[in-house]
Image (tube, rainbow, N blue to C red):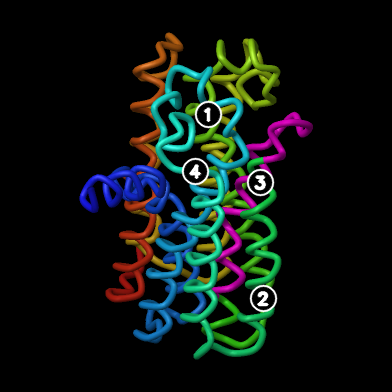
Amino acid sequence: MRANRLRLYIHLTRLNRPIGALLLLWPTLWALWIASNGHPNPLITTIFMLGTLLMRSAGCVMNDYADRKIDPYVERTRNRPLATGEISHSEALVLTVMLCLLSFLIILPLNGLTILLSIPALLLAASYPYTKRFFTLPQAYLGVAFGFGIPMAFAAQTGHLSNVAWILLIANIFWSVAYDTEYAMVDRNDDIHLGIRSSALLFGKHDIAIIMLCHITLIGILYAIGVYLHRHLFFNAGLLVALGLISYQYGLIRKRDRADCFKAFLHNNWVGAAIFAGIFLDYAFPIRG
């Protein structure tokens, strides 16, 4: 019985599907390395990595609670523990509070500005699931929620918020719109039936072009940041690899096949990893080129 409950909790918090945590983690790591000039405080890095996992798990539970009356009618989500009734609504709320409390406790060693920024970060995460009811572009809101670790990382490392922090957040918004539109393309038919808002519906026949434009804007903003910060060969090499990976995604989504769109969404993990690898290597080995 206990093993079965543990399995349900893992399923509810998506610990069995780490892609969401990774898409949340990569921009945070970009920010930590850039804010610290390639030498992030090990304690701060550990706190942010653990906090990312905890808040992503809490966000998944919040999302399923918000969608508890919708998920049973969506093919991809009908077997989630809240949708099937295997986990009660009150149990999910208790789990959410516990995860949020743990997330708050682990950031207490950080400075006051970081702790202060955790408040809007929590509000963004909690409110995001409800934006699909009224906001025509919830993927942009997701980009802010998923990217708020960026200003928090700058605050933790430097004690203040630079313009680079906010520009990096904007870059993450474009990336989120790109990959979450690929995700929304999987649920397009269900969303139409249920009246859910999404970028895939908003963009219509222009969805693929806008996804590619958002990806290219991400790379362009990061390149501009690299120029501003006088970064070198590896930084740009990471962006070039990411651009190649993005072109592969175009091949996946161009026919709008649901399975291939989902593969493209998952593939963004490698885009984030390539960008981070470039940042990491550039600070470790500052070769001009």
Q: Secondary structure at mark 1?
A: helix
Left or right: 73 with respect to 76? right
In space, the residues marked 2 and 3 are separated at their CA atoms by 25 Å
Q: Residue at x 67, y 77 (%)?
A: 161
Mark 3 highlights which residue? 128
Residue 164 visible, this angle:
yes
In space, the residues marked 2 and 4 are separated at their CA atoms by 43 Å
Instruction: Assess whether residue 222 is covered by the magenta stretch.
Output: no
The amino acid on which the numbered mark 2 sits, given as a three-letter code, is Ser
Mark 2 highlights which residue? 162
Q: Residue at x 54, y 66 (%)?
A: 100
- Magenta-drawn segment: 130-153
Vertical placement of 246 versus 142: above or below?
above
Q: Residue at x 41, y 33 (%)?
A: 80
The amino acid on which the numbered mark 4 sits, given as a three-letter code, is Ser
| Foreground disc of the pair 2, 4 | 4
Q: Secondary structure at mark 2?
A: loop
In space, the residues marked 3 and 4 are separated at their CA atoms by 21 Å
**Dot placed on the residue nearer the N-terminal end, 4 or 1:** 4
Question: Crowdedness of circle 1 by 10 Å Cα count: few (<14), some, many (20+)?
Answer: some
In space, the residues marked 1 and 3 are separated at their CA atoms by 24 Å
Instruction: Assess whether residue 145 is covered by the magenta stretch.
Output: yes
In the orientation shown, which residue stands out farthest toward the right? 134
The amino acid on which the numbered mark 3 sits, given as a three-letter code, is Tyr
Question: Crowdedness of circle 2 by 10 Å Cα count: few (<14), some, many (20+)?
Answer: few
In space, the residues marked 4 and 1 are separated at their CA atoms by 40 Å
Q: Secondary structure at mark 4?
A: loop
**Dot placed on the residue nearer the N-terminal end, 2 or 4:** 4
Q: Secondary structure at mark 3?
A: helix
Mark 1 highlights which residue? 212
Mark 4 highlights which residue? 88
